[in-house]
Image: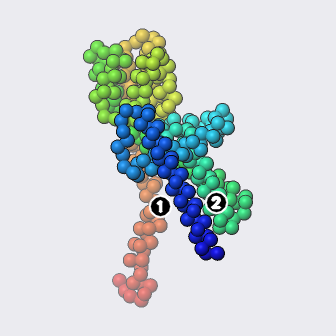
Amino acid sequence: MTWLLASFYGSCLGLVCLWYGEMETSWLLRHRLGSENVFSGTRWELFLMVVRGVIENCGRVLWRQFASSKVGQNSRQRLTVAGHPANMTIQELWGWRLVLGLAGFGYMHIFGAAIGLACLGAYLCSRLPYLWLTSAARQRDAAIRQALPGVLDLLVICTGAGLTFDAAVAVMVEKSKPNPLIHEFQQVLHHMRMGDSRQEALRRMATRCQQADVRSICATLIQADQLGTSISSTLILLANQIRVNQSHRAEAKANQAPVKLLFPLIFFIFPSLLVVLFGPVLLGGTF
């Protein structure tokens, strides 16, 4: 019986290796046909790309069923707010949900859990990509907030020098270091070059960014474009207001520090201090 099981698992492993070899060859062939450059990454990078491609193909079948539903729109919104980390597509996101859900169901079922509990484990595991997207969105929001005053100052300098808004955005995208905010303005510039109006491109940027300061900037620029007012003076006022808002947020976080310190003080520092002070007395010593 042991030899039969060993032969079965060895055959399965051999079939998986052959299948992966075929997938790797087909991926390299598609990459060579679609691009003039030959793939120059490592074997590990190639393995990750092939695995992500397979998971994306699996998720594409599932996404077709939920694309127009409320759940599908919620997933698309989460991915957009997170900025498509690691160039993840919505099909790949649903592929990871499917794989993790099946893995959670199998893990719970192998250890003797009931069907209902296994289904609950599958659902919770399928929500893990959303936790990763939430973390990525939080990091992206912090990076946008940090880069916002400097980007506005650069826009003020460019528009004050006589450049139009489109030219100022192009100069800013070219001269600035890559960050999520620069990527958003690059998207705005791309949409305007593809034929969208400035107002429509800024509305799309406000939809992608859920931060209040970015929405305020987009709304103010749209209003300035509709009324024909000076963009430079508007940006100066916005930059000053955003710096004031950031200083207020920093003061609010500083005021929250004493409250956040209560838990480690009560449960970690005070018990140690009490042991040091009253330990000798309880053990029969004197001060």
Nearer the observer, 270 or 66: 66
Give the residue type that dot 1 points to. Answer: Phe
Q: Single out the residue that lies furthest toward the left.
A: 161
Please identify the quarter of the rendering in which residue 107 is found.
Answer: bottom right
Task: Please provide percent x and percent y for residue 127.
Answer: 59, 49
Give the CA distance from mark 2 to mark 1. Answer: 39 Å
Q: Quadrant of the N terminus?
A: bottom right
The image position of residue 251, as x and y in percent, is 39, 43
Secondary element under disc 1, as helix, strand or loop, is: helix
Looking at the rendered structure, which numbered label has been put on residue 106? 2
Local crowd at mark 2 within 10 Å, few (<14), some, or many (≥20)?
some
Examine the rendering and report whether any part of residue 133 can be seen.
no
Residue drawn 43% across the image and 15% down it: 224
Q: Is residue 245 above or below residue 283?
A: above
Q: Amino acid at mark 2?
A: Gly
Toward which corner of the image does residue 116 lie, by quadrant?
A: bottom right
Q: Earlier in the sequence, mark 2 or mark 1?
A: 2
| Residue at numbered disc 1 | 263
- Camera-near label (2 vs 1) is 2
For the point 61% across and 35% down, which residue is it?
73
